[in-house]
Amino acid sequence: MKKIKKCIQSILIRSTTYGPKWVLSEMSESELLKELQNGKRYFYRVKVESGSLMNMDLGNIVFDECVLAIDFTGTNLTYSRFTNSNLRTCIFNNTNLNNSIMVGNSLSGTEFKGANIQGITFKENYYLGMELTISHLEDMIVCKKKINELLLADPFLVELTVAV
């Protein structure tokens, strides 16, 4: 019985010391704005449930393994990096994403209407388990539709998303 108790204590100490892999620090819009005003440009495992960073200059910003629901409309995001993140309902309308990197993200309800994407790296991004291509991104920009609206308009893709 003592061995089991020590084992449980050891597990509890390790889990509270190191935490699970996806522990996110939650941040409000005002906290995020304060960090940005202080010059921070790298965010790792941050969760922002809602916010607006419209018409800002956020070139070279990095969001790695984050959960974001932010309106970036009109923002300069040149040379930015969004990797392995959940960008649910983020709005990138009329945003400058030139030379940015978007790799390994979940894009649910994300908008890119009128975004500039010259030189963007767009790989391994998904919507409902379906990998999105640069063509999907271009269609969202030109057609001015969210990814879910765009995919539901294509009967072949509807079958794919239902099958997932």
Image: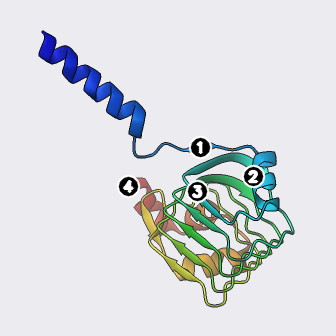
The colour scheme used to paint the residues is rainbow
Q: Amino acid at mark 1?
A: Ser
Q: Which mark is residue 32?
A: 2
As helix, strand or loop, the secondary structure at mark 1 comes to strand
Q: Earlier in the sequence, mark 4 or mark 2?
A: 2
Distance from disc 2 to disc 1, alpha carbons, whole Å, reads: 11 Å
Q: Amino acid at mark 3?
A: Ser
As helix, strand or loop, the secondary structure at mark 3 comes to loop
Q: On the image, which quarter does residue 87 sit in?
A: bottom right
Q: What's the residue at 69%, 44% (across, down)?
A: 27
Q: Earlier in the sequence, mark 1 or mark 3?
A: 1
Of residues 71 and 30, the one nearer the viewer is 30
Position of the C terminus, as image quadrant, is bottom left
As helix, strand or loop, the secondary structure at mark 4 comes to loop
Disc 2, disc 3: CB below 8 Å?
Answer: no
As helix, strand or loop, the secondary structure at mark 2 comes to helix
Q: Is residue 106 above or below residue 8?
A: below
For the residues carrying marks 4 and 2, which lies nearer the camera in this image? 2
Q: Earlier in the sequence, mark 4 or mark 3?
A: 3
* Residue position for label 3: 108
Is residue 19 among the parts visible in the rendering?
no
